[in-house]
């Protein structure tokens, strides 16, 4: 457990550090918006590629995981700065607090066994996530080919509902991560396996943060 806590803190620390540096060093004013967005998109793509490579590797690679955390942090820093500057000032701090609240609530529910992670639970979460991602892809395609606001998942009541579904799925994945850690400890997994737990927890927390940020942004912009 100490290894899991240490590795997770290290990985999240890299995400947070790079996010803060990106927020400070990559301005999102009108003169620099295009350059900063370009860097953020490139960082997001690199983070995605690194996460896929780690996901298919049979063993954890700390360099890949920390590299993923660094590039993910760059993307989050620029994206969060843009949202806070141009759409909903002050929402980022609320999203961070919301992420902590969702994570703490999920941990309490898991420890109290209000959430029981079974094979059926994992299958349901996997199927729901696949449907969620397919809707996201459809929304992106509609937006790219001239449907304006796509399927409407980024504004109004539908956007809030879709974001809440994303938060619930993120919480479910967090419960799966807790189960993975618990099983690894019970079966005496080697200390290096803690990096896989850190990778999974970090990825899930980033998901939850982005969904919380979306819900709060829509809510604030509509009011």
Image: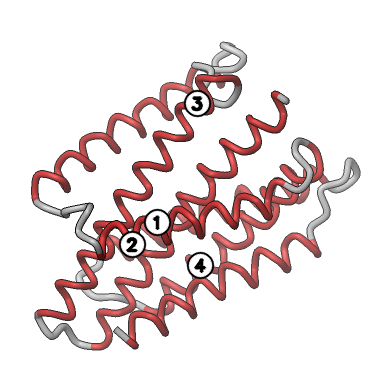
| Of the image marks 4 and 1, the number of the one nearer the N terminus | 4
Q: x%, y% of residue 157?
A: 54, 20
| Of the image marks 3 and 1, the number of the one nearer the N terminus | 1
Disc marking residue 120:
none
| Of the image marks 3 and 2, the number of the one nearer the N terminus | 2
Q: In the rendered image, which residue does mark 2 sit on?
A: 108
Helix, strand or loop at label 1? It is helix
Mark 3–mark 4 Cα distance, whole angstroms, equals 25 Å
Mark 3–mark 1 Cα distance, whole angstroms, equals 31 Å
Extreme-top residue of the structure: 147
Q: In the rendered image, which residue does mark 1 sit on?
A: 105
Please state which of residues 172 and 112 is positioned toward the viewer in this rendering: 112
Mark 1–mark 2 Cα distance, whole angstroms, equals 5 Å
| Of the image marks 2 and 4, the number of the one nearer the N terminus | 4
Q: In the rendered image, which residue does mark 4 sit on?
A: 69
Q: x%, y% of residue 185?
A: 18, 80
Q: Residue at x 24, y 57 (%)?
A: 176
């Amino acid at each position: 457990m100490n290894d899991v806590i240490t590795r997770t803190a290290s990985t999240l620390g890299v995400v947070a550090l790079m996010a803060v540096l990106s927020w400070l060093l990559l301005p999102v004013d009108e003169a620099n918006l295009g350059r900063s967005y370009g860097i953020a998109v490139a960082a997001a793509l690199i983070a995605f590629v690194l996460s896929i490579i780690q996901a298919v590797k049979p063993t954890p690679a700390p360099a890949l995981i920390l590299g993923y955390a660094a590039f993910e942090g760059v993307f989050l820093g620029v994206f969060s700065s843009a949202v806070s500057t141009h759409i909903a000032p002050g929402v980022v701090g609320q999203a961070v607090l919301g992420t902590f609240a969702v994570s703490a609530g999920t941990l309490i529910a898991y420890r109290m066994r209000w959430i029981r992670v079974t094979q059926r639970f994992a299958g349901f979460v996997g199927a729901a996530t696949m449907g969620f991602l397919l809707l996201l892809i459809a929304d992106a395609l509609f937006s790219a080919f001239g449907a304006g606001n796509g399927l409407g998942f980024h504004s109004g009541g539908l956007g809030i509902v879709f974001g809440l579904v994303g938060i619930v799925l993120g919480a479910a994945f967090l419960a799966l991560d807790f189960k993975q850690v618990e099983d690894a400890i019970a079966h005496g997994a080697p200390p290096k396996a803690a990096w896989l737990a850190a990778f999974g927890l970090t990825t899930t927390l980033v998901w939850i943060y982005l969904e919380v940020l979306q819900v709060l942004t829509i809510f604030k912009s509509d009011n």
